[in-house]
Amino acid sequence: MDIFDGILLGFSQAATPMALLFCLLGCILGTLVGVLPGIGPSATIAMLLPITLGLDPLIALIMLAGIYYGAQYGGSITAILVNVPGEPSTAVTAIDGYAMAKSGRAGPALSISAIGSFVAGTVATLVLAIASPALSQIALKFGAPEYFSLTLLGIILVVVLAQGSLLKGLAMATLGLLLGQVGTDVFTSATRFTFGLDDLRSGIDFIAVSVGVFGIAEILRNLEAADGMSRAVHKITRLLPNREEFRRSAGPIFRGTALGSLLGVLPGGGAFLSSFASYAVEKRLSKHPEEFGKGAIEGVAGPESANNAGAQTSFIPMLTLGIPSNAVMALMVGAMVVQGIQPGPRVIVSQPELFWGLIASMWIGNVMLVLLNLPLVGVWVRMLRIPYSVLFPGILAFACIGTFSANGIELNLYVLAASGLGGYLLTRIGCDPAPFLLGFVLGPMVEEHFRRAMLISEGNLAVFVERPISAVLILVTVVIALMTLVPSLLNARRTVFAHADD
């Protein structure tokens, strides 16, 4: 099947009434959680995972994907109007977007944000459609050694790019890897680390852990930082940009799209890294760098295009290789697994309707988001008046009911509570939960592919360097690890000797 046939197949699946309804629902929820600071797509997707069990796999993934890229749109609204980024990736947008709003240019800032997001989403979806089949064909040649090397590289990259210190990121990934080993050994059928609990024979429930680490922990963090203060919202007097604003925005939109499309593929990249990188590029290339921070429209156009492009292309490694590039993609992998789908290169061959339907739905979702955001901007801003203390009891009840109803196991409620408390305490000491969740998802894959490679090679570890693709992946992993560790060790050494001299 060529790309054109695949796109036609995708639209035939994504344009059904049920798919359109859930795409719209995902976009609305995504915009809502983007507007409301502190909730975020990770927590929302985690809490909605139990609901997806009763849906068709394609419908479920369309809704969850809409939440993710919809949050990028919604986050820009409050970033521009009230200087409160709804999403971390829109923190850069707030710098110049809010300055534009204070000077009476909130409308053009919102319009350019929506236009840039739509252009970036469209281009990135096309990149996704072109690049994914090619990568899948390459990945079909992978065996157990290549998959082990690839998953190892994914974990290392996420640890390196995680927020906070390298040691804490490594510790979180290791904790996730260890917890992923609980359950029944797939090769020997022996139970491991179950402590005699039959409910743990199939492993620690992914839904309970993800809802706890992202949902419950997020509630606790927001309650700690919640303030019932009302925020001043700048009025919108003129919506459409003038000719000069369009001219100055064109270059940043296309550069941001290209940069976001590239960085979104990298583990740990996605929308957050793309928006910051785009802002730095635009400030360096601008003929008027002194305007940045004071209302430069390039500071809105570039980052907004980049974060939406990054959000879309972060699906590429997840769909083609089964390797999540960030925490949200790890949740998407979990959603596929609980639906009985094995993420990876065979999805495009075995389930082309799902693969192409999800890609086509992204373009449809971007159209919906443009229509939702600008005309209804007043509705979204009013959501900020709802105190978080009113929202959290419903969110908590929803999380608990959803987790229990997924499989009716009481133990999962204890896992939910422990994961939520643990996630909250770990973030308080500066630990990023993303490496933990990625380690938890990838841990069983790492073990399975390693042991399968050992069976094939009769215990010969050289199999990982004798096969060219695996050897290259191992080499890249080692180089990245050394590039990260050596500077850290040198800095620690200088600190020790500095204290010794004192």
Image (cartoon, rainbow, N blue to C red):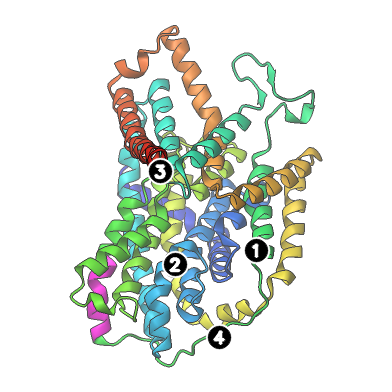
How far apart in space, not on screen, are marks 3 and 2 (Cα)? 44 Å
Image position of 435 with respect to 119: above or below: above
Q: Say which of marks 1 and 2 sits in front.
A: 1
Magenta span of residues: 244-254
Q: Quadrant of the N terminus?
A: top left
Q: Amino acid at mark 4?
A: Ala
Q: CA distance from mark 1 to mark 4?
A: 20 Å
Which mark lies nearer to you, 1 or 3?
3
Tell me if residue 252 is in the magenta stretch.
yes
Type of the residue with mark 1: Asn
Residue at coordinates 22% horizontally, 79% vertically from top-left? 247
- Residue that sits furthest to the top in the current view: 458
Residues at marks 1 and 2, CA–CA distance in whole angstroms: 18 Å
* Residue 291 on image: x %, y %: 28, 79
Instruction: Identify the image quadrant of residue 360.
Output: bottom left
Q: Which residue is mark 2?
A: 90
- Please give the residue where the numbered disc 3 appears in the rendered image: 502
Along the line of sight, the residue nearer the viewer: 385 or 145: 385
Q: Tell me, yes or no, if residue 341 can be seen here.
A: no
The residues bearing labels 1 and 3 have C-alpha atoms spaced at a distance of 43 Å
Residue 298's spot in the image, x, y percent?
Answer: 29, 74
